[in-house]
Image (cartoon, rainbow, N blue to C red):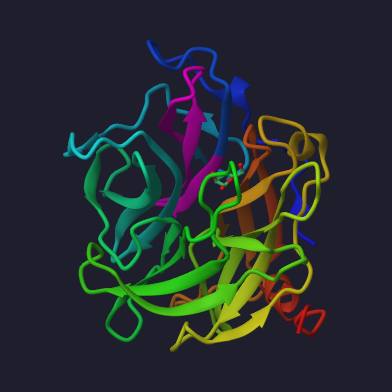
Amino acid sequence: MLQRHSANPILTRKSIPDVPPHLIDVSSVYNPGAIFWKGKHYLMLRTQARSRETFFMLAESDDGVDFKVQPKEIKFSNIPEHPKAFHYYDPRMTIIDGRCYIMFAVDFEDFCSLGLAVTDDFEHFEFVCYTKGTYLDTRNGVLFPEKVNGKYLCLERPNLAQEEGNPTSGDTITLSSSDDLINWEHQSNIISGRWRFWDERIGAGPPPIKTREGWLVVYHGVATHFSSSNIYQAGVLLLDLNDPSKVLARSRHNILEPREDYETIGQVANVVFPSGAIVSDYDNEGFALPDAEVKIYYGAADTSIGLATATISELILASQEPSGNPGS
Ligand code: BMA
């Protein structure tokens, strides 16, 4: 249902300039955060060096399609040396009260946590904290762009499930709230994986988009019942504007699945992983317009970056149709 851009994949390992000593002839670039800020589109890239270490880099563009990657890695100031974090990845970017926050996954020795950083100018990036919350092992943290009923909100995906030989994963997207963006408290479970359908394991994608109909949430789902590999797809949800713990609609079908070669072949085959969205137009109260175009940026096969689009109305319709909850 999403339309792939004809320039796909819009970023590949070849788009990444060499930055000695670590980033030389890199292996891959994928799962970017995305934001529109002062007339420019920005992507925060998950770039993987041949050491298999991950580095964040910034790419910018006037049109949201043709991106230029800055020849440096993003270094957060004030980052604590302890505890030892092995790996930062899958950044999501959200503007709250005029500041751009970045929430990302952090792998420690035995668990995954959520890190938070902030920038006011896309030159300096300051580490804020490892968030403290209900779950010790959690991923796919995504901030809402504004407070709801006086609280900051975020979606997260606690890692509670594990198949033998695989890292921990999860099949529930939860809602947490906070007064300070640092300490988070579990509010409710939003959706669970639908066993034997496209979205058995799940996690939120880009930050929720505010529309007159509700909060639009693009999420990823994983079908785990194929013998050869897991298949990562995208779908869409609509949450109540004033009470986002209420799910108004959930797409029965996926809205994007791996079909093109750059999605089916790569470091991890059969993956589309939406992580950033940029909406073309909002009204003066901050609601995305029905005809606005949504650019959805996604990791393809953990190797490169794709762009796919739809209008706000098309995404809302996709969340509602075809009706009926599979498995119910
Ligand atoms: C998920 C995360 C993503 C990755 C995806 C496919 O569990 O680790 O970063 O893109 O798997 O490998």
Position above or below: 163 against 135: above
Position above or below: 99 against 86: below
Position above or below: 54 against 24: below
Residue at image location 53% in from the left, 22% down from the top: 16
Q: Nearer the viewer, residue 37 or 134?
A: 134
Q: Quadrant of ligand 1?
A: top right
Residue at image location 45% in from the left, 52% down from the top: 92
Residue 36 among those drawn in magenta: yes
Q: Quadrant of the N terminus?
A: bottom right
Q: Which residues are magenta?
A: 31-59
User: Where is residue 319 drawn, in percent x and y?
Assistant: 70, 76
Residue at image location 54% in from the left, 59% down from the top: 161
Residue at image location 44% in from the left, 30% down from the top: 54
User: Where is residue 233 drawn, in percent x and y?
Assistant: 71, 55
Q: Nearer the viewer, residue 159 or 199?
A: 159
| Horizontal arrangement in the rendering, residue 273 relative to residue 149 (left or right) | right
Position above or below: 152 against 245: above
Q: Quadrant of residue 22?
A: top left
Residue 67 among those drawn in magenta: no
Q: Quadrant of residue 311?
A: bottom right
User: Where is residue 307 drawn, in percent x and y?
Assistant: 67, 46
Residue 15 shows in this picture:
yes
Q: Nearer the viewer, residue 328 or 54?
A: 328
| Horizontal arrangement in the rendering, residue 245 relative to residue 148 (left or right) | right
